[in-house]
Amino acid sequence: MDRRRILVIAGSDSSGGAGLEADQKVIAAHGCYAMTATTALTAQNTQGVSDIHFVPSDFVIKQIDACMTDIGVDVIKIGMLASARTVDAVANALKKHGEPITVVDPVMVATSGAQLLPNEAVHNLRTNILPLTTILTPNIPEARLLLQNAGLGAPETNSLDDIVNIARVVQSLGPRYVLVKGGHLPLTKDGHISKEEADRHVIVDVLYDGREVAIYQTDYLPSRNTHGTGCSLASAIASGIALSKSPDRTNDIPDAVEMAVRYVEAGIQTSFDLGYGNGPINHFHSLSMRLPPPFPSTLKRSVYGKAQDGGGAAKES
């Protein structure tokens, strides 16, 4: 069987820009097959979330079992888990089904800064899900929350070096890879956190596997259409892993991340306004005639200075 089966365990977004709806669009755009286990239903649009209906954890597990015992999966993508009970139930399900390759987008902090998961659920996610995670994709506020929950403090983030340090410490909590997303903190040309709109030049995502730090740098795109970028990036990574032809698909994770970053960048470049708030990216830009393919990309991938060098500036590979 072609290895393109992806099970998404996450919440639903009624407006279609994030959550399960965005995940399925991304997976379909990559030519993969999407299945779902719904953890919560949200009433939301481009302006925010007005209500959440939580799915009982035992029913979440029934959905997971139904997919895995019949169709099977090659990669699992986890998004919003909603409650501590669901976190524990999903962790047990992963163990029961042989700990498959898992991409975890820890949906814990809203764009507004509000914490979406209670502290107990954050603790259970850290202790029960992270050790089973192939690649974790937190944004900087989520990474800081995980470190605070682990009693490791919340390091300041004023530069690229600080983001790299956060990635290294979060990776020590259990996941094989950590991709710290820098979209919340655009950098200046010299690699520091921008203080003014005019200084926002680049976005940097940092991947760490316990040995090497990879830097994915793209130009900052001033756009309000960024709703669901985290969900979309994680699902694009899951698709890239599922599409890998190597015997051990996890060896291709750096390439899957690169493909995913390019995908989201093009999605923002070709987005169109929907609603009155933050609209979604264009998930089907590969079918769009708005830009001639291949889409122009500003992505630069490099290897961060080795640990023995004492850190420092990124080096292009």
Image: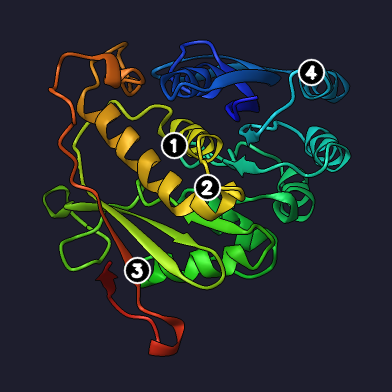
Q: Residue at x 54, y 65 (%)?
A: 154
Residue denoted by label 3: 303
**Label 3 vs label 4: CA separation?**
40 Å
Which picture quadrant has residue 223? top left
Residue denoted by label 4: 63
Helix, strand or loop at disc 2?
A: loop
**Mark 1 belongs to which amino acid?**
Leu
Can residue 315 be seen in the rendering of this structure? yes
Circles 2 and 1 in contact, beta carbons < 8 Å: yes
Q: Where is residue 131? Give x, y as percent.
A: 74, 56
- Chain-order first, disc 3 or disc 1: 1
Q: Where is residue 40? Give x, y as percent.
A: 68, 20
Q: Nearer the viewer, mark 3 or mark 1?
A: 3
Circles 4 and 2 in contact, beta carbons < 8 Å: no
**Label 2 vs label 1: CA separation?**
9 Å
Nearest the camera: 221 or 269? Answer: 269
- Chain-order first, disc 3 or disc 2: 2
How is the model colour-coded?
A: rainbow
**Label 4 vs label 2: CA separation?**
24 Å
Q: Residue at x 65, y 24 (%)?
A: 1
Q: For the residue carrying disc 2, how many other residues have a C-alpha within 10 Å: few (<14), some (14-19), or many (20+)? A: many
Which picture quadrant has residue 305? bottom left
**Mark 4 belongs to which amino acid?**
Gln
Residue denoted by label 2: 137
Q: Where is residue 104? Give x, y as percent.
A: 61, 42
Residue denoted by label 1: 233
Can residue 140 be seen in the rendering of this structure? no
- Chain-order first, disc 4 or disc 2: 4
Circles 3 and 2 in contact, beta carbons < 8 Å: no
Q: For the residue carrying disc 4, how many other residues have a C-alpha within 10 Å: few (<14), some (14-19), or many (20+)? A: some
Helix, strand or loop at disc 4?
A: helix
- Chain-order first, disc 2 or disc 1: 2
